[in-house]
Amino acid sequence: MSASEVVLIRHAESVWNAEGRWQGQEDPPLSARGLAQADSLAESLRDAGVLRIVTSDLRRARATAEPLARTLGLAPIADPRLRELDVGRWGGRTREEITRVDAELLARFDGGDLEACAGGAESLARLARRARAALADLVATSPEPVIAVVTHLGWLRSVCAGADFAHAEWRIARPESLLRD
């Protein structure tokens, strides 16, 4: 058996989102606004048929998943494969700070160079391979027909061909539409 629908969810606003800081795999908590977004998300998905919740193991994703899990009476499963792009030395810095110390690499990264390693750490190409493999595995091994995946913007963009998600935004997708080559 495998999942026939995946509810893709971007984590709610963190304190670093509010400050304009790059997060990557750093672990800031949700802001007060983010906590409210997570509660609202749980209500909006109450009747979506979600039977399994898989979340990044980073705090902002887990805190987004918790109200949904309570609402649905489910235990979220933390999965490190759902982590955001590792931005290395850029973590915790604003774009302005990154530009001062790493302008050339940031320009390559912003210009779409899939092999440019953000902050000297992970490239978008590597993230895409990691995210697509994780999603394929989750879909193939889920005994539940509808699963929620709570993750990060970079991860979502890598499996949704550049789509943009607002904080705590969700979209239902058919796995076959995401896992095409």
Image (cartoon, helix red, strand yellow):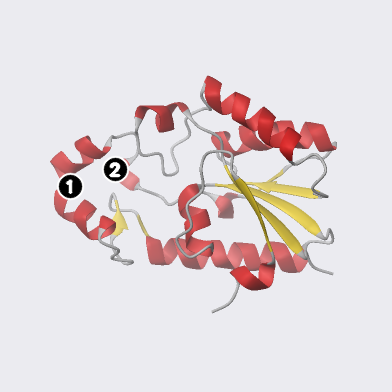
Binning the other alpha carbons within 10 Å of mark 1 as few (below 14), some (14 to 19) or many (20 upward) gives some
The residue beneath circle 2 is: 89
Q: CA distance from mark 2 to mark 1?
A: 10 Å
Kind of element beneath mark 2: helix
Q: Nearer the viewer, mark 2 or mark 1?
A: 1
Q: Where residue 121 sits in the image (x, y, percent)?
A: 34, 53
- Disc number at residue 141? none
Q: Amino acid at mark 1?
A: Asp
- Judge left or right: residue 89 versus residue 153: left
x and y percentages locating residue 83 in the rendered image: 52, 49
Report which quarter residue 69 is drawn in. top right
Specify the quadrant of the image occupied by residue 43.
top right
Q: Residue at x 51, y 24 (%)?
A: 31
The quadrant of the image that shows the N terminus is bottom right
- Disc 1 marks which residue? 102
Label 2 close to label 1 by CB (< 8 Å): yes
Quadrant in the picture for the C terminus: bottom right
Tell me which numbered mark, 2 or 1, is placed earlier along the sequence.
Answer: 2
- Left or right: where 33 falls relative to 85: right
Left or right position of 149 against 29 = right
Q: Does residue 115 show up?
A: yes
Q: Residue at x 72, y 31 (%)?
A: 67
Residue type at numbered disc 2: Arg
Q: Position of residue 95 (x, y in %)?
A: 25, 39
Q: Residue at x 41, y 28 (%)?
A: 18
Q: Position of residue 64 (x, y in %)?
A: 63, 35
Q: Measured along the vertical axis of the image, is residue 179 above or below residue 118?
A: below
Q: Is residue 133 left or right of residue 91?
A: right
**Counting other residues with Cα less than 10 Å from the Cα at mark 2, is it few (<14), some (14-19), or many (20 or more)?**
some
Q: Is residue 47 above or below residue 66?
A: below
